[in-house]
């Protein structure tokens, strides 16, 4: 049995991100591994010791602020969870919650400060020649974890600085900030990327990597399935 | 003097543009604004300046309002061609103005793009603004619903009377601290009201105290009847509420008056109720509204129905990147009588931009297609495998799913491997190909 927590499921869920949980359940169940998914959000009690994998998705600027206020009560629990090598998967702007600070349009807010990186919103005052306050577009990335490329989409309003251990390297478009090609963040079993949406649906090889590793920690056997997701992935890259 | 010259230039440019075969609905306005930035401020506008905006339903609403007002002897100028940006609106106003700078009409009626309100309302102040809904819609352009909410909220002038669909908490939020008049509308619970099965609801929390909103019922997505558990914010009883909603038989009741809907889509109940509320707000009597709404000849957006190999083939507009509109079309198909084959798929997410974000297909409740009347689902287009995967995740019987990678196989596949009436919902480029296939089949007979 693998226990999964979808944290802020009703708040940080833009861009079809419920599909990441579905991809985890679908692939584990095909391997006859039982999965339990709990949905938790603002003000609810959470016992992190129960979980093997925690997922948080992306949200609008109001939602991320609401989540930031709420998640601080878990700081100690989260540090313990991460240090025990448990899995934390973050897509979109969820990663900014775990950094040291967030410079929004109006002020600077403290992050969870579990990791050292920090975030700046893209504002016209800071980036005088920016035509927009958002970054939007398809992305292609590489990683040392698997040989296949990562594909995805970004739609965000911030840059992340001072990441020393990035998860991916962008080969096309958006990285953590314009001065680097590194994207996302990784530490132990924390996998954070600014790519939004159904990351684990669109990148079946990356999903296999994560679930193989996760299953091993539970002494369960995971065998990648050859399914439609891989055909969709190949067709997308072929175009 | 200069004003007169600019008006003349705008009219002439638009006429020339039309004569040379161009659309011509924005170019004159573009040049006029270049030459005289504040020209619109110098035009004497009519008593009613009405805007209609929202993520979906604004074209249908504007068209129906035009009918209600003109059939009641009001002279209405409106952007029928749908140029809803600042240059389109400038063209519209200047084309219909005398050279002395008077807009010659009783009403200026505008369908407006949410992102352009801030530019348009800087120049002209609307007396009334109707907001239909705020949903996930073209995220590469609109980011997310809160961004759309803010774009509208920040643009509304203090004195504008706003007409709000309060079933949508994001629209209802417009009234917080609004200084002008507020009229509300909504629709009662009906056969189409379901809670979506996916965890992707927007606006789940109270905008005042951040408590989780409690719902009495959902119509679709985050739209329904809700209240804050601490009583800070709620849908309440709308000023105009459609009751006895019978979508399949195209009937609703507002203020005890029975109204015939123009089609059996849920969204028609919304735009009819919205137009009713707006019409009453500007002083049109019930009987004068009803005579137009119940006129058999007023039909909006006719459906395209063809014959294909002695089967009915109906083409629906695919609202890519708007999960709730897309879902309503699926609901419509499911509610039709008889066995069905559905053709889905797309080459591009949008016709407005080249970025293909396919996240939105995971925000649509395709699970509802698990229905015994749906015999086959045919998947086409560049993203056919993504669509097939989505259907597999929706646990649709694999025997019903047919993948057609090559469009030249579509005709034979549908003829030989599927049954029932055909419903297709595809992107614009695939729609052109489908029409050719239908035409080719009919020419062979």
Image (cartoon, helix red, strand yellow):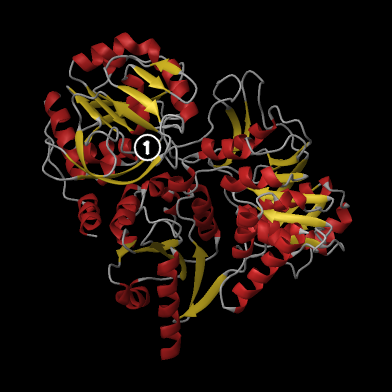
User: From what the image shows, is residue B213 above or below residue B50?
Assistant: above
The quarter of the rendered structure image containing the C terminus of chain A is bottom left
User: From what the image shows, is residue B364 above or below residue B337?
Assistant: above
Of B375 and B363, which appears nearest the observer? Answer: B363
- Point 49% across, 56% down: residue: B319
Of B165 and B410, which appears nearest the observer? Answer: B165
User: From what the image shows, is residue A212 above or below residue A85?
Assistant: below
Q: Which residue, as the protein is rendered here, is positioned at the far front? A: B1
Can you see residue B69? yes
Drawn side of residue B101 relative to residue B176, left or right: right
Can you see residue B273? no
Residue B213 at what x, y percent from top left? 57, 26
Q: Which residue, as the protein is rendered here, is positioned at the far top? A: A76
Drawn side of residue B244 relative to residue A196, left or right: right
- Point 60% across, 54% down: residue: B85
Under circle 1, the secondary element is helix
- Res. A74 image quadrant: top left
Q: Label 1: few (<14), some or many (≥20) within 10 Å? A: many
- Point 17% across, 43% down: residue: A205
- Point 40% across, 79% down: residue: B437
Residue B281 at what x, y percent from top left? 82, 45
- Res. B69 image quadrant: bottom right
Q: Which residue is mark 1?
A: A18
Chain at numbered mark 1: A
The quarter of the rendered structure image containing the N terminus of chain A is top left
């Amino acid at each position: 049995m693998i226990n999964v927590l979808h944290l802020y499921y009703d708040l940080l869920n833009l861009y079809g991100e419920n599909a990441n949980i579905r991809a985890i359940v679908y692939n584990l169940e095909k391997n006859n591994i039982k999965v339990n998914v709990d949905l938790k959000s603002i003000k609810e009690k959470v016992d992190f010791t129960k979980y093997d994998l925690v997922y948080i998705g992306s949200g609008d600027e109001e939602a991320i602020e609401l989540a930031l206020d709420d998640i601080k009560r878990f700081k100690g629990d989260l540090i313990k969870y991460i240090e025990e090598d448990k899995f934390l998967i973050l897509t979109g702007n969820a990663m900014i919650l775990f950094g040291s600070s967030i410079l929004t349009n109006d002020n600077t807010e403290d992050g969870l400060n579990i990791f050292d990186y920090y975030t700046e919103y893209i504002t016209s005052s800071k980036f005088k020649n920016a035509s927009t306050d958002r970054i939007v577009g398809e992305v292609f990335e590489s990683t040392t974890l698997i040989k296949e490329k990562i594909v995805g989409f970004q739609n965000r309003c911030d840059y992340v600085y001072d990441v020393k251990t990035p998860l991916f390297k962008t080969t096309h478009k958006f990285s953590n900030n314009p001065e680097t090609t590194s994207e996302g963040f990784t530490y132990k079993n924390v996998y954070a990327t600014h790519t939004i949406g159904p990351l684990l649906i669109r990148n079946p090889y990356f999903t296999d990597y994560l679930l193989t590793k996760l299953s091993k920690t539970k002494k369960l056997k995971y065998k990648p399935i050859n399914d439609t997701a891989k055909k969709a992935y190949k067709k997308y890259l072929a175009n | 003097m200069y004003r007169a010259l600019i008006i003349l230039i705008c009219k002439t440019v638009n006429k020339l543009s039309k004569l040379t075969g161009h659309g011509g609905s924005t170019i004159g306005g573009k040049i006029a604004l270049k030459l005289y930035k504040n020209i619109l401020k110098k035009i004497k506008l009519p008593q009613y300046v009405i805007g209609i905006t929202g993520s979906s339903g604004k074209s249908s609403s504007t068209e129906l309002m035009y009918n209600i007002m003109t059939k009641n002897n009001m002279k209405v100028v409106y952007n029928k061609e749908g140029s809803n940006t600042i240059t389109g609106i400038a063209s519209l106003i200047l084309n219909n103005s005398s050279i002395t700078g008077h807009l010659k009409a009783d009403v200026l009626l505008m369908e407006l793009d949410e992102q352009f309100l801030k530019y348009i309302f800087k120049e002209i102040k609307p007396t009334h603004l109707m907001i239909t809904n705020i949903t996930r819609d073209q995220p590469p352009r609109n980011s997310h619903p809160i961004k759309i909410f803010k774009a509208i909220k920040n643009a509304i002038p203090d004195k504008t009377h706003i007409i709000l669909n309060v079933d949508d908490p994001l629209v209802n939020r417009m009234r917080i601290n609004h200084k002008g008049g507020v009229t509300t509308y909504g629709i009662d619970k009906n056969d189409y009201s379901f809670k979506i099965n996916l965890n992707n609801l927007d606006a789940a929390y109270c905008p005042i105290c951040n408590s989780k909103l409690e719902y009495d019922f959902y119509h679709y997505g985050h739209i329904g009847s809700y209240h804050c558990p601490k009583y800070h914010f709620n849908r309440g009883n709308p000023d105009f509420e459609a009751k006895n909603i019978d979508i399949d038989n195209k009937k609703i009741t507002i203020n005890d008056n029975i109204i015939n809907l123009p089609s059996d889509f849920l969204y028609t109940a919304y735009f009819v109720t919205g137009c009713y509320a707006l019409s009453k707000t500007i002083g049109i009597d019930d009987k004068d509204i009803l005579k137009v709404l119940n006129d058999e000849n007023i039909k909006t957006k006719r459906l395209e129905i063809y014959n294909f190999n002695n089967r009915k083939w109906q083409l629906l507009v695919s609202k890519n990147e708007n999960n709730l509109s897309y879902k309503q079309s699926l609901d419509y198909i499911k509610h039709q009588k008889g066995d069905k084959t559905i053709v889905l798929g797309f080459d591009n997410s949008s016709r407005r931009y080249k970025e293909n974000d396919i996240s939105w297909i995971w925000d649509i409740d395709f699970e509802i297609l698990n229905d015994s009347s749906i015999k086959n689902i045919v998947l086409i287009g560049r993203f056919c495998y993504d669509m097939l995967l989505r259907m597999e995740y929706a646990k649709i019987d694999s025997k019903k799913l047919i993948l057609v990678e090559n469009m030249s196989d579509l005709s034979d596949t549908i003829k030989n491997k599927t049954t029932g009436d055909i419903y297709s919902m595809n992107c614009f480029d695939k729609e052109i190909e489908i029409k050719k296939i239908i035409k080719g089949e009919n020419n062979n007979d």
